[in-house]
Amino acid sequence: MARYIAKNIVAAGLADRCEIQLSYVIGGTEPLSVMIDTFKTNKVPVEKILEVVKKHFNLMPSGMIKQLDLQRPVYRKTSVFGHFGREDPDFTWEKTDLAETLRREAGLESRKETETPREEEKPAEEKKEVITY
């Protein structure tokens, strides 16, 4: 789920880089903390990114199972060549289907078809802007 959220944040243009950390307690239904680190590449305040993440992603275990459609057996596909970074419709955590919604909710204009791709990733600065709740 963290990868899915981070990919949508970057695809939406809210940040050029993003790392999400979710912490849970056994038996809990909500995360104890959600950490968003954009490595100072965020285009909107990290607090706003957290707000739209909490609004559009169900972070309860049952919500993650439902949102990512994880009740299907995809064992063979995930056991060969890994399960991250592959374009396969069964790998729902690779989708960026909420990018435009996140972009709109964060107050950024819609991406134009003529917009040039993002420049190469910049090296992370020593200080990180991190927010947790």
Image: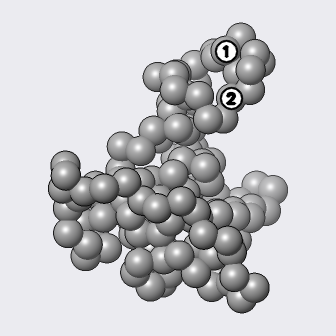
Along the viewing direction, whichever of 31 and 8 lies nearer the viewer: 8
Q: Amino acid at mark 1?
A: Lys
Residue ranking furthest to the bottom: 127
The quarter of the picture where residue 111 lies is bottom left
Along the viewing direction, whichever of 124 and 55 lies nearer the viewer: 124
Residue ranking furthest to the top: 76
Q: Amino acid at mark 2?
A: His
Is residue 57 in sight in this rendering? no
Residue 40 x, y percent position in the rendering: 58, 81
The reply to whether callout 1 and callout 2 are in contact (CB within 8 Å) is yes
Judge whether 22 appears above or below 117 on screen: below
Q: Which mark is residue 27?
A: none
Task: Give the residue displayed 25% in from the left and 56% down from the top.
Answer: 115
Residue 50 x, y percent position in the rendering: 49, 74
Task: Give the residue displayed 57% in from the left and 19% down from the top.
Answer: 72
Residue 21 x, y percent position in the rendering: 70, 64
Residue ranking furthest to the right: 26
Where does the C terminus fall, quadrant-wise?
Answer: bottom right
Crowd tier of the residue under label 1, counting other residues whose Cα lies within 10 Å: few below 14, some 14–19, many 20 or above: few
Q: Which mark is residue 77?
A: 1
Name which of mark 1 and mark 2 comes first in the sequence: 1
Which residue is label 2 attached to? 83
Query: How far apart, in angstroms, are the residues tagged by discs 1 and 2?
Result: 8 Å
Judge whether 80 appears above or below 98 on screen: above
Task: Give the residue displayed 20% in from the left and 69% down from the top.
Answer: 109
Task: Give the residue displayed 75% in from the left and 85% down from the top.
Answer: 126
Which element carries disc 1, helix, strand or loop? helix
Which element carries disc 2, helix, strand or loop? loop
Along the viewing direction, whichever of 70 and 93 lies nearer the viewer: 93
Is residue 109 in sight in this rendering? yes
Judge whether 65 appears above or below 46 on screen: above
